Image (cartoon, rainbow, N blue to C red):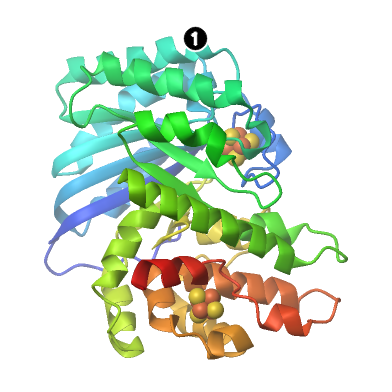
Amino acid sequence: MNFPLELAVKKINRHSLIINLDYCGTCHGTCSGCLLSTEEKDSTESFLTLEKISHCFAEISKPLNYVEQLAIGIGRGNALALQDQSWDILKQLGEIVQQYFNYGTCTLEVATSLIGHQRQQLDKAKALIDWYNQQYLNIDCKFVVISNPGLTSKNYWKNIQWFLSELALKRGGGENSADILVLNLMSDSLPSLKLLEPLLQQHHGPINIFWASGVEFKYLSENVGFRQKIKAVSHWLEAFFQRSKKLGLDCNLNNMMTLIKSSNELETKEVLEQLNQGKGSLIFIDKNADMTWGDFTVLGEIDPVRQFNPGQTNDYDRHHSGKNIHSEIKQLFRHSACQQCDYFSVCLMSGGYKTAALNIKLQESRSVSESTQWKQCCPSALKSVFEMALN
Ligand code: SF4
Ligand code: SF4
């Protein structure tokens, strides 16, 4: 196990901690920007055993006295498609969470793509909610529905709406009864806002945006330009931001824009200090039970191993995320659009710079030469949203 936890002299209290597990790969989805390999998606059993998870929790909890808000993410495939032993581990997980962590609230966030037999998956989801209610471990069981951008028909969104509303009803329909929806973005199949509208109006829980541009662009053929793809995402983000603001959605894009409005006047140095202070609240445990720090960004939680080096989890410097903030910023300094950008500090604050740095790096690694238009293009796709939010 390889994790940079410093030996703590005195145990600390944390306001929040999210631990995301690469628990399973099982999924019949077809998203072209999937972080999983075909082999991983075809697997029918979980990658992690209870024993391996226990070891990781023991390490993570060593320097901690108390966590006010703890969340355990069960990713990355469709946990509701798991059977037998792998499914049972999800039930036993609660006990080891309680064994290692002293927490105020704890949420188990179970990922599902809902691809497969939906009635069966709904029944399993309800059974898991009941199980955790009966265990009295003070653990709330929530589901994270990850949308498959390749399947965005009217019926597809209707099914998601049905699943989310059934579970909200199961919890009594009151405050905090809703699950989480993640809109997984791909530049060539962005969800239609028209088809999404009924869901946006009805769903009262968080609706978060996720864009893993590194995975999408890594395998792009040399003659396909990034610029048009980034522009497509940028236009979609603008339209979604306008709509989500109007509807007052609990969305990572809205929430981050509210936060940066209050930090807009900060100097780059102060923003960097804030970013460093925020580190250490997000941990990823990969399928081999190796751990790494993650980063919160406006375009989703970043797992540096999966997102920055897809398919090569073993050879990667796992401490990348904590060490390379300055080299990522240098990437932006080399790009004309960023050099002249009025929203540079805001881009740092939101974590958008991570997507930008990665896209610049990927473009530079291609044999096609950079066009003037590319140099003028905002590489994070976020500039127009910053403009809207701050003006
Ligand atoms: S739903 Fe998630 S796990 Fe399944 S294919 Fe799509 S991105 Fe991959
Ligand atoms: S908003 Fe776009 S152009 Fe501005 S600094 Fe960020 S990535 Fe660069």
- Residue 167: x and y in percent read 34, 19
Residue where numbered disc 1 is placed: 120
Image quarter in which the N terminus is found: bottom left
- Residue 195: x and y in percent read 55, 32
Q: Is residue 348 above or below residue 381?
A: below
Q: Nearer the viewer, residue 273 or 391?
A: 391
Q: Nearer the viewer, residue 333 or 246?
A: 246
- Residue appearing at x 45%, y 29% in the figure: 198
- Residue appearing at x 61%, y 70% in the figure: 358
Image quarter in which the C terminus is found: bottom left
In the rendered structure, the answer to whether residue 352 lies left or right of residue 32 reads left
Q: Is residue 4 above or below residue 133?
A: below
Label 1 crowd bin: few (<14), some (14–19), many (20+), radius 10 Å: few
- Residue appearing at x 42%, y 40% in the figure: 52
Please, what is the three-letter code of the amino acid marked with disc 1? Gln
- Residue appearing at x 63%, y 39% in the figure: 149
Q: Is ligand 1 less than 8 Å from the beta carbon at label 1?
A: no
Element class at badge 1? helix
Asked which quadrant contains residue 92, the reply is top left
Q: Nearer the viewer, residue 230 or 238?
A: 238
Q: Nearer the viewer, residue 213 or 26?
A: 213
Displayed-image quarter of ligand 1: top right
User: Is residue 134 visible in this depiction of the protein?
Assistant: yes
In the rendered structure, the answer to whether residue 92 lies left or right of residue 369 reads left
- Residue 151: x and y in percent read 66, 31
User: Is residue 6 visible in this depiction of the protein?
Assistant: no
In the rendered structure, the answer to whether residue 205 lies left or right of residue 290 reads left
Give the number of marks. 1
- Residue 205: x and y in percent read 31, 35
In the rendered structure, the answer to whether residue 135 lies left or right of residue 273 reads left
